[in-house]
Image (cartoon, coloured by chain):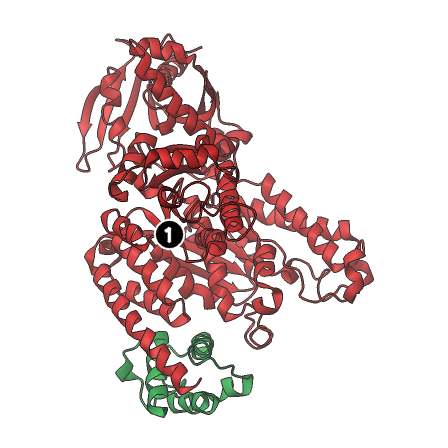
Amino acid sequence: MTETGLASSLGNGDDVVFLRELFNQAVVGGDAHALARAAQVLLKADGSRQNHRFLRNAIGRADSRTSGLRPYTIALLSSFSIEFLHDALIAMGIAHGLAITIQQSGFNTFRQDLLDGESSLYKAKPDLVVLAVEGEAWTVAPYGAFFDAAERDIEAVALTVRTELASLCKAFRSRCAAPLLIHNLAMPAWRKLGIGDAREAAGQTALVLRVNEAIASCAGEATDVHVVDYAGLVNRFGALSWYDDRMRLYAGAPIASAMQPHLAATYVQYVAALLGLAKKCAVLDLDNTLWGGIIGEDGIDAIALGATYPGSAFVEFQAYLRDLHRRGVILAVASKNNPSDAEEAFDKHPSMLLKRSDFAAMEINWGPKSESLVRLSKRLSIGLEHMVLIDDNPAECEEVRRSLPMVSVVQLPPRPEAYVRTLQEAALFDTLGMSVEDRNRGKLYAQRAEAEALRGAMNSVEDYYRDLAMKLTIAPVGKDSLTRTAQLTRKTNQFNVTTLRYSEAEVERRAQEPDWIVATVAVEDRFGDNGIVGVIMAQAEDDALMIDTLLLSCRVIGRTVETAMLAHLCDEAQRRGLRTLRGRVIPTPKNEPVKDLFARHGFDKVDVDGQGTTYWRLDLDAGRVAHPPWFA
Amino acid sequence: MRDNIEKTVRQIMADILNLSAERIEEGTSMDNTEAWDSANHINLVLALEEEFGIALDVNEIESMVSFPDVVQVVAAKV
């Protein structure tokens, strides 16, 4: 490094010193939001190994009970030396409000660790298990042993990997209910057949693709097993950059130092999705965000949006947002503009890809953006912590960061061609998979807004319920509803009596117990099919049916669906000859809507404990919850 | 220049070994520093390479067994 290079890096270092000081203050401050934000800012300023180590040390010295971070244990099993990314993983965890503890298994002992019920893996009671295995450790056929004739039967290779993986998953699942992440196989950087490989039916390319199919289908059949697209990750950065041959051969550590944070970030994305920390709603600015220029000044004919640069970059950004919307992300607008100017742009501009109907709500006014966000949060019943402001204006971004620290802010870079990548790298909206509900969610929120409007026009609330023409389906949880059921327990915060979070494996296990009722609630109305919106779990104990979980997605709150759920539980209790229905409400900052649920339905409060949890009881001999008459 | 390198190396070693910078001395070596194990040696190499924009070969990696050795190897590379 030259003198000037060193000097300039020390210059940046001064900012980092300052940001580290702010971080240290946040560590003792006891506010997890503030601590996570301080970590985000520090990591953005300096993504070096040294800075990751700093964050790890700083949090290691702190008292975990006062930092406010949520403890989370990850068991890492690997076919290679993966400990060199521990620092990055822990640092990125802090930025997500997590105090990550890593249980590291030995070098390439993943098979033994999975099969041995007494292994340190299981003793650590992990929240997540990661099986970071390079392709060679599953099968050498697409790699070193490619020219070994016996290994060239592509189906036999896929079957061998699949069989082993299935039996390891089974052994794991019998001992542990945590979600499991497995890597798929990366393509080798160079092919042994050289330029001829790509057309070989059993070339290295074909072998890797076939084995990856087998891994995906094996994971799909198991419960709560997810595939880390390692092939995609290596491909994105390029195999020549991804691997460090020196460290692979010298230290058994094949992943290049600069690439390790990308893998750690991918793991953290899974953690965020599993914990329901993924964002739900993208709140967009308009001028210089959805189009170039200022609609109110430049006019509809002069804004940049169309076939030529820079308009082409804005069209591409709108296309990306439309894809997010199709995937289930809710779109909204917060813009300082005259509503009529903005509406004209949406209605009349020939290159406008996004339609006004793609947005669940718009706040177009001259007030502070933080106030617009608060109003959007109320109108859409989406918590501020699930909203992301996407804006090019640094001042607006800063105002929201200061006023609403729980809102994520993506400040767009100066050039519009980098907008899409900025959002892709932020990876804020990723979920584990796409359910039917996800695919329809964008539409559902628009339907909900229509339903709200209808309520305003009705004379009585009962007329409104009847007019909605709701059809309710309460059904035992099954294989096809398992993902959605676990997802709802993890992400429902408001209408949730106990806010107990469950993995797919836990739900599945419970559903097989004869004393448990585990049911999903689906609601259709005249505006469309809302899909599965509620979950009930209850256990028969002595002469009582104990409600463990009763939750409803916020999009159907206020339609007496909860009354129907309690009525259903009364039916179930009576069918089983039980005499009381019991429930409890564990208070959280979010679940205000359920505080009076049991009182409203005739339950008696029998106890309150030191944490404020209230206990309720309904004597079925004396009365029961009636079915609301408007459900079909 | 050499002072700057020594200061930066000292701070990197302190962070990796989770010791205060004053405890990194002339006599600090792999033999007498418990936290300086083979895994942290690799962590040290990777951090030095990143900070100074250098690449170390395995001979150099294996020769860095004390604090002065580390400074020596890095100074010869930058």
Farthest residue to the right: give it: A149
Is A273 left or right of A67, judged from the image as shown? Answer: right
The chain displayed red equals A
Q: Quadrant of residue A222?
A: top right
Is A601 left or right of A434, judged from the image as shown? Answer: left
Above or below for A260 versus A394: below
Which residue: 51% across, 87% down? B60
Which residue: 33% across, 73% down? A12
The residue nearer to you, when weighing A617 against A328, is A328
Asked whether residue A603 appears in the rendered view, the answer is no
Which residue: 43% across, 86% down? A2
Q: How many marks?
A: 1
Looking at the rendered structure, the secondary structure element under dot 1 is: loop
Pointer 1 residue: A392
The residue nearer to you, when weighing A286 against A540, is A286
Q: Quadrant of residue A573?
A: top left
Q: Residues within 10 Å of mark 1 (few under 14, many from 20)?
A: many
At label 1, the amino acid type is Asp
Which residue: 28% across, 37% down? A365
Q: Residue B45: where, in percent of width, then height?
A: 46, 79
The chain displayed green equals B
Q: Residue A86: where, in percent of width, then height?
A: 43, 64
Q: Residue A394: where, in percent of width, then height?
A: 32, 55
Q: Quadrant of the N terminus of chain A?
A: bottom left
The residue nearer to you, when weighing A148 against A17, is A17
Using the image, name the chain to which the residue with label 1 belongs.
Answer: A
